[in-house]
Image: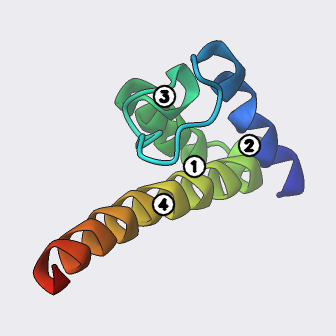
């Protein structure tokens, strides 16, 4: 499961490498919707199931982070 964190290596292809306002889902190649669909397909094969679970969990946490960031921006606008 920890090895699935290597999927973040695709962040090195972006400029700037880290942008706190950028959502990685749909932006980076290994975080694309096509890649996520492949991760779901990997669930059907017993030998790759644990890797698929780790990758899908990783994508879910990145997706959740995007929404928390958006929620934080909306909350800041309300408080201004």
User: Which disc is residue 60 wearing?
Assistant: 4
- Foreground disc of the pair 2, 4: 4
Mark 1 nearby-residue class (10 Å; few <14, some 14–19, many ≥20): some
- What residue sits 42% from the left and 46% below the top? 21
What residue is disc 3 on?
35
Up-down relation of residue 4 to residue 13 (above or below): below
Up-down relation of residue 53 to residue 79 (above or below): above
**Mark-to-mark CA distance, 2 and 4:** 18 Å
- What residue sits 41% from the left and 27% below the top? 27
Up-down relation of residue 56 to residue 39 (above or below): below
Report whether 29 appears left or right of 18: left
What residue is disc 2 on?
48
- Foreground disc of the pair 1, 3: 3
Earlier sequence position, callout 4 versus callout 3: 3
- What residue sits 15% from the left and 72% below the top? 77
Q: Secondary structure at mark 2?
A: helix
Q: Secondary structure at mark 4?
A: helix
């Amino acid at each position: 499961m920890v090895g699935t964190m290597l999927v973040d290596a695709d962040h090195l292809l972006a400029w700037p490498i880290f942008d706190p306002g950028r959502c990685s889902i749909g932006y980076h190649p290994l975080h694309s919707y096509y890649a996520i669909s492949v991760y779901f397909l990997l669930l059907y094969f017993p030998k790759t199931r644990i890797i698929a679970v780790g990758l899908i969990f990783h994508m879910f946490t990145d997706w959740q982070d995007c929404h928390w960031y958006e929620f934080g921006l909306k909350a800041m606008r309300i408080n201004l």
